Amino acid sequence: MDINKINGLIAAPFTPMYENGSLNTGMIKNYAGKLKNDGVSGVFVCGTTGEGMLMTLDERKEVAEAWIEEQTSYFRVIVHVGTTSYKQSCELAAHAQDKGAFATGTMGPLFLRPSRTEELVGFCSEIASAAPDIPFYYYHIPSISGIKLPMTEFLSQAAKKIPNLAGVKFTDNDFMDMLECIRLDDGKWNILHGYDELLLAGLSFGVKGAVGSTYNFMAQLYYKLINCFEKGDIDGARNYQAMSIKVINILVKYGGAIVSGKALMKSVGIECGPVRLPLKNPDKTMYDKFIEEIKNTGVIF
């Protein structure tokens, strides 16, 4: 398969929910419109930020369908189909392809984690084969999956077994491994950087595309960072990265990027509702303090 690489920023969207915890997929059309207006290149749905593992298979299909309806040639949808059961992941992957998604992706299984690269390749190969006509990305996120295997080894082995392999969503700070992935096979693979707070570092190593949760509400700031970097204005790029880090530190302080990030979306006109257990929603007092600290950063969303 020829790899049609995605460049630019790809948002990892929150999954909109009503106060009772049921899905509010009717919000996704407006959500997608906002991201398109911000210049975002696409979305990686039902992943970590989207609480994918906390939803049923039917709910994940419903969310995927709603996003795919908003897909265009310049706004692509990658559907995360990862589960502990490769059988369930195959079901989600086949559904994503049938509905017209641009690509699928999966992290490794959280239970009985692969300890060898060939085991991970075997797991991913089954899932990718369920949607053979669209690209497949491996979602490398050791901090969540607990799977810490070299992605250079993964790509080298997976290239022989996964015909529709496109690349890796690389959410790790092992930049040596990431650089080797970027350069592997004459730059063939689409390596998508996954740490928002380290985007400038990723750009310096050669990434052209990035997936992140704060691109939901700070995409324009990051595009200014990218513009400075491309013009050689490294000090300017550092300043924008520092601004994003200031916001991210506050997100971490108030429950983490999923909990506080989802709450913050209300401030940019997209009501995403509560998070699901075991995550804990902020009470009104905490939310008000959180928003006040965000405003005090001076970052405009």
Image (tube, rainbow, N blue to C red):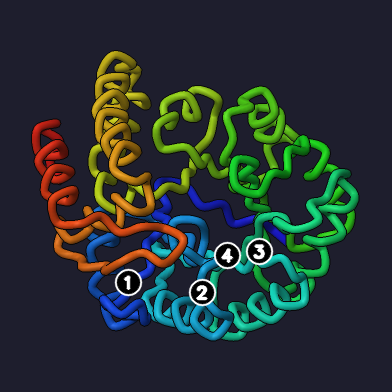
User: Label 3, label 1: how many angstroms apart (C-alpha)?
Assistant: 26 Å
User: Label 2, label 3: how many angstroms apart (C-alpha)?
Assistant: 24 Å
The secondary structure type at the circle numbered 1 is loop
Q: Are marks 4 and 3 in contact (CB under 8 Å)?
A: no
Q: Give whichever of discs 1 and 2 has the lower sequence position.
A: 1
Give the vertical position of 57 relative to 166 (above or below): below
Q: Give whichever of discs 1 and 4 has the lower sequence position.
A: 1
Q: Give whichever of discs 3 and 1 has the lower sequence position.
A: 1
User: Label 4, label 3: how many angstroms apart (C-alpha)?
Assistant: 12 Å
The secondary structure type at the circle numbered 2 is loop
Q: Give whichever of discs 2 and 3 has the lower sequence position.
A: 2
Q: What residue do we see at 49% from left, 23% from top?
A: 204
Location of residue 247 (image quadrant): top left
Label 1: which residue? 16
The secondary structure type at the circle numbered 4 is strand
Give the vertical position of 197 relative to 280 (above or below): above
**In the rendering, which numbered label is found on residue 135?**
3
**Total numbered circles:** 4
Give the vertical position of 95 relative to 237 (above or below): below
Label 4: which residue? 80
Q: Amino acid at mark 2?
A: Met
Residue 108: give x, y in percent of width and height: 72, 55
Q: Amino acid at mark 3?
A: Pro
Q: Is residue 285 left or right of residue 187?
A: left
Front residue of 40/105: it is 105
Q: What residue do we see at 83% from left, 38% from top?
A: 153
In this rendering, the label closer to the viewer, 4 or 3: 4
In this rendering, the label closer to the viewer, 3 or 1: 1
Residue 167: give x, y in percent of width and height: 67, 49
Q: Amino acid at mark 4?
A: His
